[in-house]
Amino acid sequence: MQGHSDDQRELLDVESVAGHLIKPGSMFGFLAAHRARLFPPDLFEDLFPSQRGRPSVPGEVVAAVLVLKSLHHLSDREAIEALTFDLRWKAACGLAVTDAGFDPSTLTYWRRRLAASSRPNRLFEVVAAVIAETGAVAGKTRRALDSTILDDAVARQDTVTQLIAAVRRVARDVPGAAEIVESQTSGHDYSRPGKPEIAWDDPQARDELVSALVGDALAVLAGLAELYPDSEGVTDKQSEAVALLALIAGQDVEPAEGSDGTDGRWRIARRVAPDRVISTVDPESRHAHKTRERRQDGFKAHVVVEPDTGLITNTALSKATGPANSDAAVGIALLQGDPTLPEQPAEQAAEQPIEVLGDSAYGTGDALAALTKAGHTPVVKPWPLRAAVEGGFTLDDFTVNDTGDAVTCPNGVTRPINDKGAVSYGTACRGCPLRERCTTARRGRKLVLGPHHALQRAHRARAATATHLETYRRHRPMVERSLAWLTRGARRVPYRGVVKNNAWLHIRVAAINLRRLLVLGLHHHHGTWAVT
């Protein structure tokens, strides 16, 4: 059953004894004064439908600990130690000097209940409601989209390690798989920890080991297919283990030289598979890079920022790769779900459009089309155009006719646009006096126009104006500052998987926003939240 705090203060209540030592305007002082108002008991009623059993730790106490824990990026055990020995934490949570903290596993218990509820991100929603009530972003007509890479909590694994770990997991999780592994594998003793003992500097020995491990994986998969036809009687967890083994067995290998794979000879592929799984410990972690020089493994945190106040109005965590997880796809979805933006038809939005700032990752045709359809004004850095010849003509040097079915090149030659959006000049490039500035292809210049090419071309022209550049340069710095607040001391996620880390990110953003509101003068006045 749900526990409740006692309104009667104890003799050694920290706020009474040492409250004057807590800095005014700090997060500790704010939670000490307003945690019960911010996190009332009815906020957590659905988590405890039964009135039987031992009372839980009061919801306002757990919520305050989760906010402080995320703000200071502590582990569960470190947070409870701070609650036990740090007077500031005791004051923020309403504990007496002599009170001991609760067991760290209580936080895990609460996170599971929150994750299984209909409102897993309710702490973020509470702070979002405070932002709306204060009017801190009311009337603000700009939002900025951005993302950053967060390091994962596991180590990157090589192909051999992943193959062995995936076979072991199947043997451990799937009934009957251990017998199949024991009877039908010969490449490695999977009951032994560590890697096989081979001459790792010998390419032939490595290829033989890879061939044996891939063969073992395929044999295990074939045995399981016979044991469980159509996956009947297999739980979701067991199916995930089998699917992971199948993925690992094929993502990093290719047939050896002179082989088609049917003879059982394999080698490590001379490429990196798209959306590659990098660890069996966290199968959702991915290779990621914001630039060519900086490469990381982990997840991508997406944010919507109000650039005048620096408040993050919406956020989400996703895998670091894949079309569905791109900056543009996730950013547009977050903007559409921003609770601080009023829901209104595009016709009404056009009367007071929202300027949406973003770097070139948000300059895709689909993103620009979605922003335009919603009545927003994109202040987005356009994708740079690359000339086929250095210093030569780009796509904008070609003219699309008024009907949009033909393109004229800089030399005045017009060619039709086919059904796939391609334009081929072919023989018209022979003897063209501008050929050296246009193409080096033997078959002449070829263009491929996307479905939103006209929208992108108009946007590139608008992005070159002084108004666009001034708005972008003026409001962009605060967005970078908000990301710095988000990642300072918290670049590495604490959990495995998207779901758990997404929940952590929402609490982290809620804590950052609450701290930012305190800087803006957050206070409670005549029953409402307000900022100075």
Image: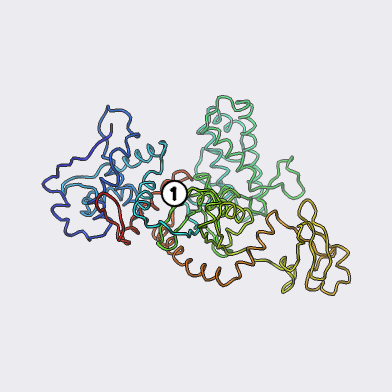
Give the image location of residue 150, x and y in percent.
47, 55
Give the image location of residue 524, x and y in percent.
26, 53
Image position of 246 with respect to 519: above or below? above
Residue with the mark numbered 1: 339
Relative placement, left or right, of 445 versus 53 is right
Whether residue 145 appears in this view of the structure is no
Give the image location of residue 4, x and y in percent.
23, 37
Relative placement, left or right, of 285 versus 513 is right
- Quadrant that contains the N terminus: top left
Q: How many labels, in total?
A: 1
Q: Residue furthest left?
A: 11
Q: Residue at x 49, y 59 (%)?
A: 144
Image position of 111 with respect to 377: above or below? above
Instruction: Tell me which corner region of the image, top left, top right, bottom left or bottom right, holds residue 178.
Output: top right
Instruction: Tell me which corner region of the image, top left, top right, bottom left or bottom right, holds residue 52.
Output: top left
- Quadrant that contains the C terminus: bottom left
Q: Residues within 10 Å of mark 1 (few under 14, many from 20)?
A: some
How is the model colour-coded?
rainbow
Q: Nearer the viewer, residue 155 or 287?
A: 287
Label 1 SS? loop
Tag 1: amino acid: Pro
Instruction: Tell me which corner region of the image, top left, top right, bottom left or bottom right, holds residue 43.
Output: top left
Q: Nearer the viewer, residue 180 or 26?
A: 26
